Image: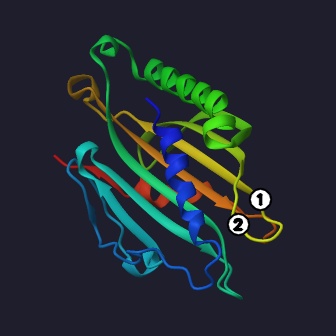
Amino acid sequence: MHHIAKCLVLASLCLTFSSCATARLTNQGNIKAPIEMKTYRISITDENSWKAWEASTQPENDTLILKKLRIWPLNGEVQGFTTVTFMRDSIAPQGWDLIETEHADNIRVIEEKIMREKGPGEGKYEILELTKGDLTRNGKKLYSMTWTASQRREGLGAGKHTVYMKGAMYLYFPEGYKDTHTFYRFLIIDSIIPPTFLAVNVEQIYPLIDAFTLKR
């Protein structure tokens, strides 16, 4: 599956706003608390803190996509973008006997291979650094893969031809996943257009992961 590559392409679309001083996302500020999806809920408590974000969904795979433009407060110039994606995924029958660590390792190997092989050509990006690990957030065991990359882009304005991005993918296998054969991917891509004083920060996804609960 090529979810990471697709999300990188999707996130890069936000850069079309980079030349607009008063840029806004089409449905910016449309997030309502809590965010209700088919199989999960994200119980954000303060809608005001999400006014700069836009939410959209893909019901066919229970996917939530949140976007935000990175705007320099002094002049309103767009200097980057952030995209967060939550998606439900399924385990193919040939993998039903594997344990979750094996699933996580296999997925991360495949995704890294796709990014390194197709990134320079199809996505015009190059992986600069990539790490894998495990962590726990609000009782959820997560298998992570974090990377930094540079992406070549046209139309960013005078002297601006490169986007610097940091991304992270978290795999979550909830209790009972061996019966449902369902797991979840949490993704974030945060990027900036140099030169800028802004910094990338993939930890923006943590409050959403903490607020993520499955419906019963």
Image height of 39 relative to 142, above or below: below
Mark 1, other Cα within 10 Å: few <14 / some 14–19 / many ≥20: some
Q: Amino acid at mark 2?
A: Leu
> Could you tell me if the residues under marks 1 and 2 are in contact, i.e. CB atoms within 8 Å?
yes
Q: Please state which of residues 156 and 179 is positioned toward the viewer in this rendering.
A: 156
Instruction: Report x, y in % for residue 212.
Output: 35, 53
Which quadrant of the view contains residue 146? top right
Image height of 100 relative to 89, above or below: above
Q: Which residue is mark 2?
A: 156
Does residue 208 appear left or right of residue 35 in this picture? right
Q: Which residue is mark 1?
A: 161
Residue at (47% x, 64% y) in the render: 67
Name the residue at the bottom extreme: 74
- Mark sitting earlier along the chain (1/2): 2
Q: Please state which of residues 61 and 99 is positioned toward the viewer in this rendering.
A: 61
Does residue 2 appear left or right of residue 212 in this picture? right
Q: Secondary structure at mark 1?
A: loop
Q: Which mark is residue 86?
A: none
